[in-house]
Image: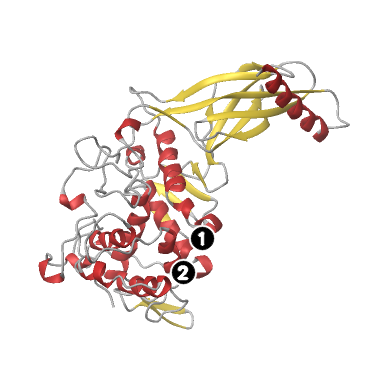
Amino acid sequence: MRMRKSIVLVASALVLATLYAGQAAASIGVVSGRLMFYNNQGNYCASDGRSCSGARYPASQFNVNMPIRDVKVYVRNNTDQIIGQGITDSNGNFKVSWWSPGSGNIVGNVTWHGEQKDGRFAIRTSSGGTWVFWTYKKTLRNNATTNFGTQVWGSNKGPNSLANLYDGAIRMWRDALNYSNRMRTYFTNVQIRAYSSSCPTSCANGEDKRIIIDSSTSAYRPQARVMHEMGHIASYLSHRDQERRVFVDYSRDGVAGWNMRSAEHAGPSFEEALATFYGDVALYWHWNPEPYSCLSSGPCPRIANNNVETSTGIRSSCSAGEERWALTSVRYLRDVYDSTSGESFDDDSEPYYQFFDAVNRFSNGYGNRSKDEPWDGFLWWTWVDDKDGRSARDFRAHLDTLAGISTYGEFSRNCYPAGD
């Protein structure tokens, strides 16, 4: 083992020496360690008798130290200049080579910035600045490996909200979006800005690839906050040319804003359902029989209104306006995706990536089943003329054509979601 470590260090030193050949004498070395945080996020699958088969976030990961995964790591010298860069692995471990002018040992430290290793997203300040998480300074030994040990951000007495926010985002990427080729191509350089009261319940801007998280409280509610907002970005980027006109109007029921069971116009209701579904998959994969979705800093209460596997039935069995609930469309999407129900109308089990590819089938323009259907336009002037356009019904038509299936059963047994 000692021989192998020496070989790795010598190889790193040779690479660095080649890069800086011809320059003055230099110090070179390696730093290693592990980055952890105290996980205080809700939406885990509780150990209360519910099924957690296929659940990606079990209760055993709550209120314990967890690795800070797939994040960029920087080595800095005593004047805070970056002299090396690397990444953490799935366990939070890192090993980074560094180079510095001069000779002998130097003083330095390690930082991380909430930046996903491949540039998928980064946690930023409310104005777009960089959050920097510092370790203590330590002597970095020349021609040797300096071990920083395990560094933990937050504790049970004071969790670090930004570290928790990063983990919610990395869960969304690793356990959901990463399984779509379309997202691997287009979901890049997304800024997650924390925190700003300018957006009281958090929001997303697809054109700018920007998410605003409203408060540190929301960092502990990943399913309905950072995962949901990343779902909106994913929806936007799935469209042709990675853009569309966004129609936001939650006034239909006479109450400001929306919730999972408010009767909204079909266009906005479906968009909220799609963003919710995208995020829910990060927590419950297709074989989980009891997936829940809610806004909570704990587990979702085990009630029917939170269970997205529940199907109310045909329209005559549904509550007034239930066909316009975001929850209704979420349940339709879940039935098309899952592989557990055993119901005669629910046997498709479509792969996750298909839901992004189906969105891409919305054509450019303002016509029926086009991506900008809610809008009308004449030259430079546009206005909304179809608030029920770009609905779950339109999505079903595109998905069925793309996959060569019929999801009419799932659609009709989930209150036949509104749309035109």
Q: Are marks 2 and 1 in contact (CB under 8 Å)?
A: yes
The kind of residue on which mark 1 rests is Arg
Q: Position of residue 16 (x, y in %)?
A: 77, 31
Mark 2 highlights which residue?
A: 360
Q: Where is residue 300 in the image (x, y as percent from the top left)?
A: 23, 43
Please tell me whether residue 41 is drawn above or below residue 321 in the rendered image. Answer: above
Structural distance between the alpha carbons of marks 2 and 1: 9 Å
Left or right, 63 with respect to 177, comes to left
Which residue is situated farthest in the bottom direction here? 378
The residue that mark 1 highlights is 182
Q: Which residue is drawn at 64% across and 24% down?
A: 31
Q: Is residue 387 in view?
A: yes
**Looking at the image, which is closer to me, 361 or 389?**
361
| Rendered residue at 31%/65% (across/down) | 270
Q: Give the side of residue 346 with respect to residue 91, left or right.
A: left
Front-most of 140 and 256? 140
Which of the 4 image quarters holds residue 104?
top right
Between 270 and 123, the residue placed more toward the observer is 270
What element does badge 2 sit on?
loop
Q: Quadrant of the C terminus?
A: bottom left
Q: Where is residue 315 in the image (x, y as percent from the top left)?
A: 15, 70
Q: Which amino acid type is marked by label 2?
A: Asn
Decide which of tag 2 and tag 1 comes sooner along the chain: 1
Q: Where is residue 99 in the image (x, y as percent from the top left)?
A: 74, 27
Disc 2 residue crowd, few under 14, some 14–19, many 20+, Cα 10 Å: many
